[in-house]
Image: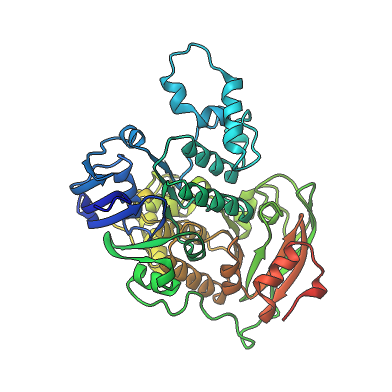
C-alpha cells in the first residue's frame, strides 16, 4: 500500500437480514486529502462509516490502517486509532454545558472527584477560537440547531485525529458558518489529517474536495479527482441513470389563476417579524427565501399558530381564519412540515402507517375511539402509492427507511388530513438527488391539483427551480418579491441583503 494511504477498505460486505447494505466495497483514503463520498440515501455510505468507526462489524472484507490490517470492534478502538466521526444526527447532552459536551470523553476517564469547570471552559474557548463565537458555559439545549452542529464538530477537533469523518456537516449551518468550516477543513487537511466528507450538495463537493467516490445500492462505482469529472457525471453515477429534469415545468401562462388560496395582511409578532403581507394563488408554488435568522420560518409558524400569538389577518380561500392553536390550523386545512424532519416531522420508532395517521387519528378510529388498523393501513397504502413510497411493510418503523422515503412519510402525514395548503420548510434537506427530483415532482402535482404549496429553502437552486414566485424575507419583513425570469440567485441575495429592489436585473 502506498505510504500516503492512511485507510484502505477492501471487499467489505455487510448485511442486515435479507438487506445487503454493502456488497464487497472498496475505498481508499490518503493523508491530507478531503475525499467526498457520494451516493443516494441507502447507497451504503453511512453503513461503511459505521464500520470504520467500530459501530458495526463487517461480515467480510479487510480494513487496513496505516499499512496494517486492523479489527475496529468499537468506537473506543476507532478513537484510539485516531478516527473522529461527526454524525449527521446531533448526539449531545442537552442539559449540560457546551464545554462539558466537548470534553465528555476525557472527563469520563479522569480520576478527579471535582469538575474543573473553568478549566474546561477555557479549553473550549481555544477550540471555538477557530470555529465560532459560542459561549462554552451555556447549556446545549439553549443553542440553535446550527450551533449544536458546531459543538459536534468542535468535539471531533479536540481528538488527536488522523482521519475525520463529516456526515452532512453543513445541513444545519448558515452559509457563513459553512464557509468557516470549509476553511478549517482545508487547514486540517494541510496539516496531514485525512477527511471523509459525505454530502448531497455537488457545489460543496466540487468547491472543497480533492477526490470523490460514488456508491450505489451498496456497491462501489467509481473514484475520480474532482478536476476530472463533472457534477452531472457524479449524479448519473449515483442514480445509475441520467436525470433529465431535477425540476418539473413551472406553471404556464395558460394555467395561471386569479384565485387566491392564502392571503396574509399585517402579520406581526415582535421582535420576530412585523407587518408581513403576501398572497398565494391557486396552482402556483410560492417560495420563501432569506438568510438564516431572517424570520422566514417564524412567519410561517406564526400563520399556523405554532409559536405563540400573532396579530394580523389571514384568509384561506376567501374565508377569514380565527386561529389560536395549531390544531385550529389543521382543522382549517393548513399544515406545516418542519425543517427538523426527525425531531418534529416523523416518529422514527413508530410504524409507517401510524406516522401517516398521526395528525388526525379520528379518521382511522372505530366508533369506540380505538384505532382501526385496517383503515390506518389503507390510508397509508393509498398515500404511499401516490408518493411512490419505497418500503417493506407498513408495520416497519420509519427509521428503517432512507432519508428520501422518510420525507415522503412526512408528506403523506400532511396529505392525510386533505389539506388546502401545505407549508414545507426545507423539504429536501438531507435527501439525495434522485429523491429530490421526485419530491419536486410531487409538489408540482399537488399545486396543479389545487393544493396550496409554500416552500421555504436555504438552497437557492431549489427555490429558483421549483418556485413560480419567491418572497424574500429580511429582518422579519418582506424585502421584495421576484417572479419569472427575475428569479435569480443574484436578485434573491440582493433583496436578502437589503439592497433596493430597483437594482434587480432581469
- Return the residue found at the far left: 60
Query: Within the image, what quadrant is residue 500 found in?
Result: bottom right
Q: Nearer the viewer, residue 304 or 497?
A: 497
- Return the residue found at the far front: 3
Give x and y (percent) for residue 189: 46, 50
Q: Nearer the viewer, residue 337 or 373?
A: 337
Task: Report whether 213 appears left or right of 115.
Answer: left
17 lies above or below 472: above
Give x and y (percent) for residue 460: 60, 67
406 lies above or below 281: above
Task: Report whether 485 appears left or right of 243.
Answer: right
Query: Residue drawn at (44%, 18%), measured in percent from left and top?
Result: 110
Q: Nearer the viewer, residue 75 or 281?
A: 75
- Return the residue found at the far bottom: 254
Q: Is residue 55 visible?
A: yes
Q: How many marks?
A: 0
Query: Residue drawn at (76%, 75%), measured in percent from left and top?
Result: 504
Task: Report whether 376 appears left or right of 158.
Answer: left
Query: Within the image, what quadrant is residue 318 found in?
Result: bottom right
Amino acid at each position: 500500500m502506498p505510504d500516503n494511504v492512511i485507510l484502505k477498505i477492501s471487499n467489505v460486505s455487510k448485511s442486515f437480514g435479507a438487506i445487503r447494505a454493502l456488497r464487497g466495497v472498496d475505498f481508499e483514503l490518503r493523508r491530507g486529502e478531503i475525499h467526498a463520498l457520494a451516493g443516494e440515501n441507502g447507497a451504503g455510505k453511512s453503513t461503511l462509516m459505521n464500520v470504520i468507526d467500530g459501530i458495526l462489524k463487517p461480515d467480510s472484507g479487510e480494513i487496513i490502517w496505516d499499512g496494517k490490517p486492523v479489527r475496529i470492534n468499537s468506537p473506543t478502538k476507532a478513537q484510539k486509532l485516531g478516527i473522529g466521526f461527526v454524525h449527521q444526527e446531533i448526539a449531545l447532552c442537552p442539559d449540560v454545558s457546551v464545554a462539558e459536551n466537548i470534553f465528555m470523553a476525557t472527563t469520563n476517564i479522569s480520576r478527579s472527584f471535582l469538575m474543573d469547570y473553568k478549566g474546561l471552559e477555557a479549553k473550549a474557548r481555544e477550540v471555538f477560537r477557530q470555529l465560532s463565537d459560542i459561549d462554552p458555559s451555556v447549556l446545549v439545549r439553549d443553542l440553535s440547531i446550527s450551533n449544536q452542529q458546531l459543538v459536534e464538530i468542535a468535539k471531533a477537533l479536540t481528538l488527536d485525529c488522523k482521519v475525520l469523518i463529516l456526515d452532512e456537516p453543513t445541513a444545519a449551518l448558515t452559509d457563513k458558518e459553512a464557509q468557516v468550516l470549509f476553511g478549517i477543513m482545508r487547514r486540517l487537511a494541510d496539516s496531514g489529517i485525512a477527511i471523509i466528507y459525505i454530502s448531497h450538495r455537488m457545489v460543496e463537493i466540487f468547491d472543497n474536495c480533492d477526490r470523490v467516490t460514488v456508491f450505489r445500492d451498496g456497491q462501489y462505482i467509481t473514484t475520480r479527482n474532482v478536476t476530472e469529472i463533472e457534477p452531472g457525471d457524479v449524479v448519473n453515477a449515483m442514480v445509475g441513470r441520467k436525470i433529465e429534469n431535477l425540476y418539473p415545468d413551472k406553471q404556464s401562462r395558460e394555467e395561471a389563476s386569479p384565485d387566491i388560496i392564502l392571503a396574509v395582511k399585517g402579520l406581526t409578532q415582535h421582535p420576530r417579524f412585523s407587518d408581513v403581507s403576501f398572497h398565494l394563488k391557486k396552482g402556483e408554488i410560492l417560495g420563501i427565501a432569506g438568510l438564516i435568522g431572517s424570520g422566514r420560518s417564524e412567519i410561517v409558524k406564526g400563520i399556523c399558530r405554532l409559536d405563540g400569538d400573532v396579530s394580523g389577518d389571514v384568509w384561506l380561500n376567501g374565508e377569514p381564519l380565527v386561529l389560536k392553536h395549531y390544531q385550529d390550523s389543521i382543522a382549517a386545512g393548513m399544515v406545516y412540515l418542519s425543517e427538523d424532519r426527525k425531531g418534529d416531522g416523523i416518529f422514527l420508532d413508530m410504524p409507517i402507517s401510524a406516522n401517516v395517521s398521526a395528525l388526525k387519528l379520528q379518521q382511522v378510529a372505530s366508533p369506540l375511539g380505538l384505532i382501526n388498523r385496517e383503515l390506518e393501513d389503507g390510508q397509508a397504502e393509498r398515500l404511499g402509492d401516490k408518493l411512490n413510497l419505497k418500503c417493506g411493510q407498513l408495520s416497519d418503523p420509519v427509521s428503517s427507511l432512507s432519508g428520501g422515503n422518510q420525507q415522503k412519510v412526512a408528506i403523506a402525514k400532511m396529505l392525510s388530513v386533505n389539506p388546502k395548503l401545505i407549508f414545507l420548510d426545507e423539504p429536501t434537506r438531507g435527501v439525495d438527488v434522485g429523491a429530490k427530483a421526485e419530491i419536486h415532482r410531487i409538489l408540482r402535482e399537488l399545486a396543479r391539483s389545487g393544493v396550496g404549496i409554500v416552500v421555504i429553502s436555504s438552497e437557492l437552486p431549489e427555490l429558483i427551480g421549483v418556485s413560480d414566485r419567491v418572497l424574500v424575507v429580511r429582518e422579519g419583513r418582506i424585502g421584495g418579491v421576484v417572479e419569472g425570469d427575475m428569479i435569480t440567485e443574484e436578485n434573491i441575495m440582493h433583496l436578502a441583503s437589503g439592497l433596493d429592489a430597483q437594482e434587480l436585473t432581469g
